[in-house]
Image (tube, helix red, strand yellow):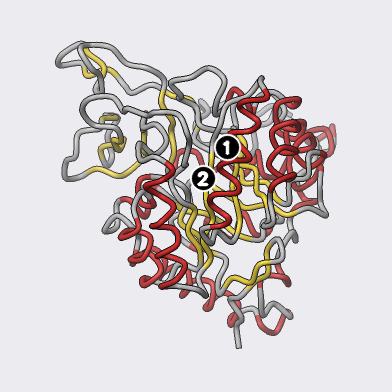
Amino acid sequence: MADLSTVFTGIRFENPFLLASAPPTESESNIMRAYEAGWAGVVTKTIGLHPVTNVRGPKTKFLRADDGGTRLSMAKRPGSTLIASWNWELISDKPLDWWIPRLEAIKKAYPHKILVASIMAGSGSDRELDNWQTLTRAVQDAGADAIELNFSCPHMDRVDMGSNIGKDKVLCSVSTQAVKAAARVPVWVKLTPAGADIAEEAGASFLGGADAISSSNTFPALPVVDPATGEFEVNVDGLVSSGGLGGPAILPQSLAKMAALTQAFPDHAFSGIGGISSFDHALSYFMLGCGTVQVATAAMLDHAIGPNVIANLKAGMTEFLERNAERGWTGLDDIRGLLRDRVVAHSAIARPDPAAYRGGYEEEEAEGYAPQPITV
């Protein structure tokens, strides 16, 4: 029988699938609905101490491509396919004292489900380090099973927060140390993909005591311009700021980030994020070495909390394990990291025999290349 359960950072999950910190996890009602739907864990929308006010108008939009065409637009229309999500939503605009009784209620109602509290404070001062610890003590006392540090949000209203921490290995280490000094539960660090070498920030976070790395958050991005109006498709009074690109478009990029992490730290724990909507996508993260995965965009488009997404993830994993049981694959531990070492430097990829080399062109015409004469 396939076993979907897993132990990650010392916590037992009934399955390795979590809702990521995002709009679907912004309220206790959504979180409880997610548990009922079958998600093993939920990462709350990021909780902070500073006042938060979001921009006017839409905060999240979805980029689609015309089927068989070239148009990319956030306009919802028939005959199109989802490419990505784009958002410039800030962290939760609800204060800590709003969240605490709700975290307590969630944990009381669902004691066997996993509740991960995402938190964020600033950097560069003792006061901000104290803020990290204040948040840590509050959410763990309210029942959080683990804490995820948001070092990754690509669009913040303060320059000392989010990805600006995640791109600085010193700030990663110092902030993690501050949290670990107050934490009684596992601490996960969510990193930005926008740095030059994500493994450096991961290493600094592990030195600071992180129990796991979550990777990665959305990629910095702008909405496209509407050719009919000459304006950005999302704007306020004609103005736009960088937001975060998620969904299917970032899956290959996020896998590359994860491969860099799991190869650098093969004995550490990782939670994979980016572009997951089916078990096929999750499998790529597992085979690179992840112990859990997190989903946002696909869930947002499925009744806000993804009841069909989680059903398909669990069914897909069950079918995959049962189909491969004769290979000894009956649970996540049997497949985790199997392909991690298959990712190598470009120079390690085999080259053809010099006598057979024709500039990269084979006998058959290669897609995307103009036909080339074959000379002998």
Instruction: Return the disc, 2 or 1, that comes first in the chain's sequence.
Output: 1
Residue 70, by quadrant, is top left
- Helix, strand or loop under label 2: loop
Residue 63, by quadrant, is top left
Q: Which amino acid is tagged 1? A: Gln
Q: Looking at this rendering, what residue extends furthest in the bottom direction? A: 1
**Residue under the image location 50 percent in, 68 percent down:** 40
Q: Which mark is residue 142?
A: none
Nearer to us in this view, 22 or 284: 22
**Residue under the image location 44 percent in, 58 percent down:** 103
Where is mark 1, residue-wise? 253
- From the viewer's perspective, is residue 338 above or below residue 180? below
- Helix, strand or loop under label 1: helix
**Residue under the image location 73 percent in, 72 percent down:** 334
Apparent side of residue 110 relative to residue 64 in the rendered image (left or right):
right
**Residue under the image location 69 percent in, 23 percent down:** 168
Q: Is residue 364 visible?
A: no
**In the rendering, at what x and y percent does residue 175 appear?**
69, 33
**In the rendering, at what x and y percent does residue 94 appear?**
35, 40
**In the rendering, at what x and y percent does residue 356 appear?**
78, 36
Q: Which mark is residue 274?
A: 2
Residue 30, by quadrant, is bottom left
Q: Which amino acid is tagged 2? A: Gly
Apparent side of residue 83 relative to residue 107 in the rendered image (left or right):
left
Q: How many numbered circles does the render carry? A: 2
Q: Residues within 10 Å of mark 1 (few under 14, many from 20)?
A: some
Tags 2 and 1 in contact by the CB under 8 Å rule? yes
Nearer to us in this view, 40 or 109: 109
- From the viewer's perspective, is residue 231 above or below residue 263? above
